[in-house]
Amino acid sequence: MNAFDLISFSSGLDLSGFFVDTSSNRERFASTEPADEIMDRVKQVGKGEGLVVKRESEKGLGAVVERQNEEFILRMEIYRLTDGVAVVEVEKGIGAAGRLWKEKLRPANLGL
């Protein structure tokens, strides 16, 4: 993570609209929950819904949630900023992804 990534986490300083399509289904929020606890909750909800949760990591701690037929539901990346603060970035798929996010995985539902 570099300085530009950190700056983009501030909604007032986010310049990504100049460089990327902002109509995507991405959402970003800060959390004081440990990254492992967030990932455990995502796994629990995913398994409860009959989904496959695969851990992956490109830049931070992450996971992909899919249906059994590998249909993309959502991707989550967690970036630890300090010992007590992490930024969670979520990319939602279409269709059932919106319902799953709103009803089961949204920060208010996760207790974040």
Image (cartoon, rainbow, N blue to C red):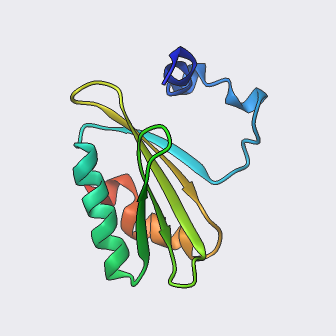
Camera-nearest residue between 26 and 50? 50
**In the depicted structure, whether residue 61 falls above or below residue 63:** above
Report the label total.
Answer: 0
Is 36 left or right of 28, judged from the image as shown? left
- Residue drawn at x 57%, y 18% as measured from the top left: 4
Q: Position of residue 95 (x, y in %)?
A: 63, 75
Q: Residue furthest top?
A: 3
User: Left or right: where does residue 33 sit relative to residue 3?
Assistant: left
Q: Residue at x 42, y 65 (%)?
A: 54
The answer to whether 25 appears left or right of 55 in the picture is right
At 43% from the left edge and 40% from the top edge, which residue is drawn? 29
Q: Where residue 25 sits in the image (x, y, percent)?
A: 63, 54
Q: Quadrant of residue 42?
A: bottom left
Q: Is residue 20 above or below residue 13?
A: below
Image height of 2 relative to 60, above or below: above
Q: Position of residue 12 (x, y in %)?
A: 57, 21
Is 108 situated above or below 69?
above
Q: Name the residue located 50 percent from the left edge and 84 percent from the top edge.
A: 68
